Amino acid sequence: MTLLAVAFWTSAALIIYTHLGYPLLLRALVALRRSPPTPAASPEGDLPRVSLIVAAYDEEEVIEAKVANALALDYPRERLELIVASDGSADATAERARAAGADLVLELPRRGKLAAQNAAAERASGELLAFSDANSVWRPDALKRLVEPFADPAVGYACGQVRFLDAAGDNMEGAYWRYEMRVREMESTLGGVTAGNGAIYAVRASAYLPLGPSGSHDLSFPFQLAKRKLRSLYVSSAQAEEKMVPTLEGEFARKRRMMVGLWDIVIGERMLTSSGYTLLYAFELASHRLLRYLTPFLHLIAFVTNFALLGEGGIYVVTYAIQVLVIAAAILGGSFPIGPLRIARYYALTTLSIAAGLWDRFRRGQPVGVWEKAPGTR
C-alpha cells in the first residue's frame, strides 16, 4: 500500500471512528460495566450552600426573568446565593437584576465572560458554584438534581441537560445536541465527561479554576479537574431550556467564535498532557475531543489523497464520489431545506467552524474574551 493510500484510509477511518465508532464502543463498554450505586439525595437540611452565578452583558431583555427563575427554584432560599456579574453592560442589566431580587450584583468593567465569572467566584460564599446563561430557564428541581453528585467527594464538576427551543428555523443543533448528550451520558458512566455546557453546570468552590480570557469552563474544567483526580459528570435530570440560534449560518458564526480559543486550551492548558488522567479518561479525551477537533484537517487529507488515488482502482472512484456528493448536498442545503441536505450542511458548517476559528486565532491573535450574543437567542 502506498503512502497516499495509507494517509487516505487512516484519515477516513478516524473520521468514521470519532463520529460513529466511538459512540458504539462507549455503548459496549457501558454494557460491560457494572453501574455504581447512585448517591442518595441529601435531606433538605443537609443541602450544600450554592452560589448561582449569571454572567451578563447587555441582558436587560431577559435578566429579570432569569432572576425570577432562579429564585423560584425548589431549593432552600437560605442556602442559595444569586450573583449577577454585569460585564460592562451599557443598558439596564444591573439595575433590573438588583430590582428583581438578586443577592449580589457586580457592575464590572467590560473584560469578558471569564473575567466576570472569576470576579463573581471570588465574592461567592457557596460551597458549590453553579453557573447559568442569562437566557437559560431552569426547571424547578434542576439545582437539587445538579448538586446530588457532589455527595461523592471525588466529584468536582457536574453539568446538566440543556434542551433547545424554537426549532422552526433551519438549524440542526437540537438534533446534534441530543446525540452529543447521549455520548456524554455514556462518558459520565465511565471515565467522566470531556466537556460540559454553559447553560447549567456546577463546580466545587474549592476546585474552581480562574481561567484566562481564551479559556472555557465547558472545555477546561473537566480535563483540568481530571488531572486533580476529580470526576466530571453529566446529570440528565438537571434540565434547562434555551433558545436555539434560528439559522445554520448563525450557528456557524456562533461556533466559529467559540473555536477561536480552542487551540489555546488544547495546547496552552496542556489538554494533551496525559499526566494525571486515568487510562479510560485519556481514551475518551482523545476520541471525543482531539479527533473531533482534527476532523476538518482529516477531511482535507482524505479529499486530496483520494483525488490523487483516482487511477488506482474503482474503490477510490466510489469514495471520491461520496465525498463530492456530501459537499454538493451541503451546498444545496443552503437553498433547499430538505432533511438530508440540511444534515449535510450542518455537518459541513460545524466542521468548518473549527478550522475557521483556528484561522481567526492566528489572524487576530489571542482572544480577549469579550463576547457577542448569538442573534435570535433572546
Image: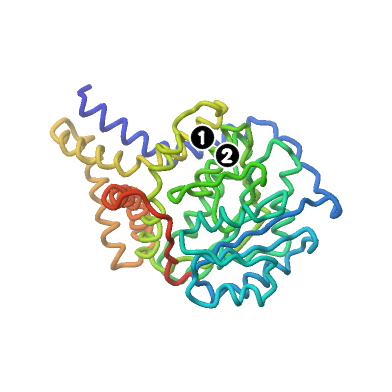
Mark 2 residue crowding within 10 angstroms, few (<14) / some (14–19) / many (20+): many
Q: Nearer the viewer, residue 80 or 282?
A: 80
Among numbered discs 1 and 2, the one appearing first in the sequence = 2
* Element assignment for label 1: helix
Q: In this view, does 130 lie to the left or right of 372?
A: right
* Element assignment for label 2: helix
Q: How far apart are marks 1 and 2 (CA)?
A: 7 Å
Rendered view: 271 above or below 140:
above
Q: Is residue 335 left or right of residue 272?
A: left
Rendered view: 208 above or below 95:
above
- Dot label at residue 116: none
- The residue that appears at 78% across and 58% down in the rendered structure is 79
* Residue type for callout 1: Glu
Quadrant for the N terminus in the image: top left
Rendered view: 89 above or below 116:
below
Q: Estimate the x, y position of residue 247 in percent, counting from the top left.
A: 39, 67
Q: Estimate the x, y position of residue 194 in percent, counting from the top left.
A: 53, 41
Mark 1 residue crowding within 10 angstroms, few (<14) / some (14–19) / many (20+): many
* Residue type for callout 2: Glu
Quickly name the residue at label 1.
Answer: 284
Quickly name the residue at label 2.
Answer: 187
- The residue that appears at 45% across and 51% down in the rendered structure is 213
Q: Quadrant of residue 306?
A: top left
- Could you tell me if the residues under marks 1 and 2 are in contact, i.e. CB atoms within 8 Å? yes
